[in-house]
Amino acid sequence: MNRMTILALGVAAVIAVTWLWHGPLGAGERFAADVERRARAMLDHDEMVRVEALLEHDPLSRRLVLSGPADDYQRAEIKRRMETIPGVGEAAWNPASLPAEQAP
């Protein structure tokens, strides 16, 4: 075998293992569930039971999307605290989520 064939086989093996790990073996979903569980615990501790925090899916990313009623101070603080959770790259409020002052 020449070097290019060996390199191509190595790349194919890495891609296959990565796909298996994040797909059928479920590591991606376990990661998402763990991050969302930690976010929910933090929100419950802060008594923000109407606020939701979910990782983006399709494709799965490290971006945590927040939604629910909260005033401007709460929004900034919740976003800051959610970004401290291990595995979260960024937290952002859903643009369709209304501030507490405008919520029904």
Image (cartoon, rainbow, N blue to C red):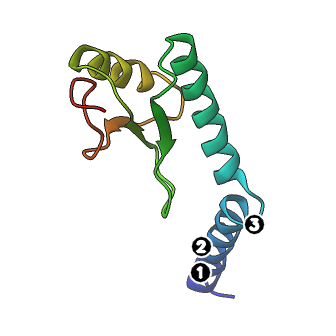
Q: The C terminus appears in which quarter of the rendering?
A: top left
Identify residue for label 1.
8
In the structure shown, which secondary structural element does the residue marked by tag 2 occupy? Answer: helix
The picture places residue 46, in percent across and down from the top left corner, at 49, 11
Which residue is denoted by mark 3 in the rendering?
24
Do callouts 2 and 3 mark residues in contact (Cβ within 8 Å)? no
Q: Quadrant of residue 86?
A: top right
Q: Amino acid at mark 2?
A: Val
In this rendered view, identify the residue nearer to me: 72 or 59: 72
- Crowding around mark 2 (Cα neighbors within 10 Å: few <14, some 14 to 19, many 20+) is few
**Pointer 3: residues within 10 angstroms few (<14), some, or many (20+)?**
few
Q: Nearer the viewer, residue 103 or 38?
A: 103
Q: Check contact, mark 3 vs mark 1: CB within 8 A.
A: no
53 left or right, relative to 70: right
**Left or right, 82 with reference to 16:** left
Q: x%, y% of residue 8?
A: 59, 80
In the image, what residue occupies the spot 63% across and 77% down?
12
**Residue 41 higher or lower than 91, as above or below:** above
Q: Residue 72: where, in percent of width, then height?
A: 21, 20
Residue position for label 2? 11
Looking at numbered disc 1 in the image, what kind of residue is underneath it?
A: Ala
Which residue extends farthest right? 25
3 vs 1, front mark: 3
Give the mark, 2 or 3, whose residue is nearer the N terminus. Answer: 2
Closer mark to the observer between disc 2 and disc 3: 3
Q: Amino acid at mark 3?
A: Pro
Q: Residue at x 70, y 46 (%)?
A: 30
Distance between mark 2 and mark 1 Cα atoms: 5 Å
Label 2, label 3: how many angstroms apart (C-alpha)?
20 Å
